[in-house]
Amino acid sequence: MARRKKIYEGKAKILYEGTEPGTLVQYFKDDATAFNAEKKATIEGKGVLNNRLSEFFMTGLTQIGVPNHFIKRINMREQLIRAVEIVPLEVIVRNFAAGSMAKRLGLEEGTPLPRPIVEFSYKDDALGDPLVPEEYIIAFGWATQQDMDDIVALALRVNDFMSGIMYGVGIKLIDFKIEIGRIFEGDFMRLIVADEISPDSCRLWDMKTGQKLDKDVFRRDLGNLTDAYTEVARRLGVMPNNVSPATKPTLIN
Ligand code: TMP
């Protein structure tokens, strides 16, 4: 079989050309990074779990009418997705203060916010993905005002869906990040949810104990990341085969 063309390699995923025009194959690596790749490790089984979990969330979003890039799972680590033009923003929705917001405002992590807050970072690793106001986004032409209205509406629908799904399995959705892509259909452009939705890009706390079940386990050295993601998958009834729960991270840097 001919070697597939690699289109893009990021920190946690690789994109290959797809089987049909307008599609890509998204491969989930076991690599984990934090703090703009200052901290790195390979965590056995993470890619398999995120492939299944992203499939689960994106399929649910499709079922409630939230457009997204997911087409179908191909194998343990790969899924077929729609090729999109990524809007260069990290769209973050927060329900409770945590992470960079807690730090910036001196709030205790877990403080409920008066309403969901949507914020944007400009996707640029060299700059460390700086937080940007909507005014910058529009002035620099990364998105139009209409795009931003659509993006906020999409982000809030994803938030309601994800909060509800997680509530049902005893998990509090603290915050999450999504990315948005453009697809072109004739003269029309549509914005859809792209990239991935997984515990790599959410904060998930056990409702009773407050135990962290997301990438903060890796960022803050709180235990075994595969165990945490496996617990999320188990509660949601998404159990990939062949993931040994007790694998230890191998430090590669
Ligand atoms: P933050 O509190 O560090 O700004 O993170 C907010 C949310 O965004 C949190 O759920 C983790 C997620 N996130 C990413 O997915 N990628 C990133 O590079 C960062 C910094 C955060």
Image (cartoon, rainbow, N blue to C red):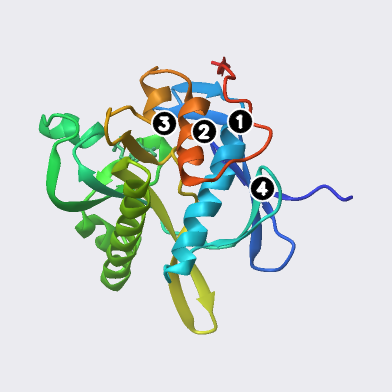
As shown in the figure, which amino acid type bears the numbered disc 4?
Glu
Cβ atoms at labels 4 and 2 below 8 Å apart: no
Residue on which disc 2 sits? 230
- Residue that protrudes farthest toward the right in the picture: 1
Mark 3 C-beta to ligand 1 under 8 Å? yes
Instruction: Please identify the quarter of the rendering in which residue 249 is found.
Output: top right
Query: Residue 8 at x, y = what percent?
Result: 61, 47
> Above or below — where is 212 with respect to 13?
above
As shown in the figure, which amino acid type bears the numbered disc 2?
Thr
Crowding at dot 4, Cα within 10 Å, few <14 / some 14-19 / many 20+, comes out as many
As shown in the figure, which amino acid type bears the numbered disc 1?
Gly
- In the rendering, which numbered label is found on residue 45? 1
Residue on which disc 3 sits? 215
Instruction: Please identify the quarter of the rendering in which residue 47 is found.
Output: top right
Crowding at dot 1, Cα within 10 Å, few <14 / some 14-19 / many 20+, comes out as many
Distance from Cα at disc 4 to Cα at disc 1? 13 Å
